[in-house]
Image (cartoon, rainbow, N blue to C red):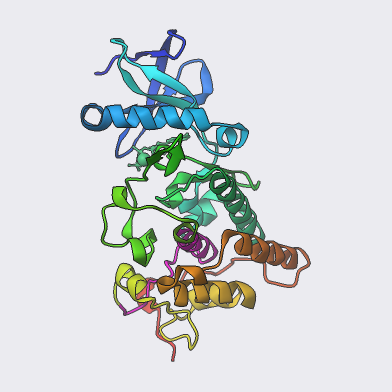
Amino acid sequence: MRGKIVTDSLGQARQLGQCLARGGEGEIYALRGRADVIVKWYYPEVLDKRGAALHRKVEAMRELRDTHTTRDVCWPLIRVFDHEQRWIGFAMYRARGVKMGCLAHSLLYARHFPDLDRRQIVGYLLRFIEIVQQLHGDGICIGDYNLNNVFCVPGSDSVTLIDCDSYQLRVGGTFYPCPVGSPDMTPKEHQGKAFRDIVRTPRSEAFSLAIVLFKCLMLGRHPYDIVGGGDPVRNLRRGHFAYGRGQRGVPQGDWYALWQALPEAIQEHFVTTFTEGADQPARRTTLAQWQAALSAYGERLDRGECPRELAGAGRTPAGRTRHVR
Ligand SMILES: Nc1ncnc2c1ncn2[C@@H]1O[C@H](COP(=O)(O)OP(=O)(O)OP(=O)(O)O)[C@@H](O)[C@H]1O
Ligand SMILES: [Mg+2]
């Protein structure tokens, strides 16, 4: 078993608590005496292979940190070394809340987010967009959009991002790519390439972000899931969005009801982004446009002009969905 004592940037010995989670690249440990701080310890094989490059990137990130990256994003704050003084990772704040993947889920949301309604979903999404806009303002791209890297506190609109060591950034003339991603969250122009060779842009980010928005407002449904149709990545590459104009292939029943409950302006942004925008990045709704559209939607929900409740939504078993003509 690995030693549980690490040394921080100041050369002070610190004791790790239990292992809280395991990711693809490392383990997350509690830090004794600091319930609000955790340590990411990269796996030995990751350190052997890419340790020097990872260390340089994390150091560059530490240089960039400021108030918003410290609290809204779990940014690397403190270097951590093992008992032989080798760099093994970093300490960061611990995110509070529940993963957005549990919110964007037709069965799980009720357990993790009691009383969730559309107003709350819009509140989380507005906060999420605000944080991403702040990052973009600093020249940082998320790249690897993943609902499990967004923590939401039930009953509030608090949102915190994790897993930021994969972000794309530029510091002092050096470019640090986002080397990971998943095809079903990646726009067409970046499909089929090694993630480490991709340069993410505000337009590519807008596409991936729109998928996050859609999945939350549609309780987990992927925009390119078409009942009886091809797989989402194939549909994404072709711009086959079932909810598009003409509405061919929209899953019937509760999914359709969720879509119908959205104001026309929001529907239009999705349709444009996922049809013309699949091929033409300039057609995608920008973050500022989403911010405006969702703020307006939030105000309409506050005034009682749109349905707030999700009741009954998304409970149709997958096998019972039908095509619409
Ligand atoms: N700051 C944090 N606050 C709370 N939990 C965290 C934090 N960072 C990581 N975790 C937990 O640890 C898990 C793994 O962390 P992380 O995603 O950073 O690891 P990774 O090795 O980069 O994984 P991946 O291969 O998915 O990118 C997360 O899914 C989450 O459950
Ligand atoms: Mg990661």
> Magenta stretch containing residue 210, yes or no?
yes
The residue closer to the viewer here, 132 or 126, is: 132
Give how far across and how far down residue 245 sits, in percent.
50, 85
Q: Residue at x 52, y 36 (%)?
A: 95
Q: Across the whole image, how many numbered discs are drawn on residues?
A: 0
Quadrant of the rendered image containing residue 85: top left
Give how far across and how far down residue 120 sits, in percent.
64, 56
- The image quadrant where one finds the N terminus is top left
- The image quadrant where one finds the C terminus is bottom left
The answer to whether residue 314 is seen in the rendering is no
Q: Does 271 sit left or right of 167 as displayed?
A: right
The answer to whether residue 240 is seen in the rendering is yes
In the picture shown, does residue 11 fall above or below 268?
above
Q: Residue at x 48, y 81 (%)?
A: 244
Q: Quadrant of ligand 1?
A: top left
Q: Residue furthest top?
A: 12
Q: Residue at x 42, y 27 (%)?
A: 59
Q: Does 210 sit left or right of 296 as displayed?
A: left
Quadrant of the rendered image containing residue 179: top left
Q: Does 102 sit left or right of 69 as displayed?
A: left
Q: Which residues are magenta?
A: 206-229
Give how far across and how far down residue 265 sits, in percent.
63, 75
Q: Residue furthest right?
A: 303
The residue closer to the viewer here, 129 or 2, is: 129
The residue closer to the viewer here, 105 or 150, is: 150
> Magenta stretch containing residue 131, yes or no?
no
In the picture shown, does residue 68 fall above or below 300?
above
The residue closer to the viewer here, 245 or 117, is: 245
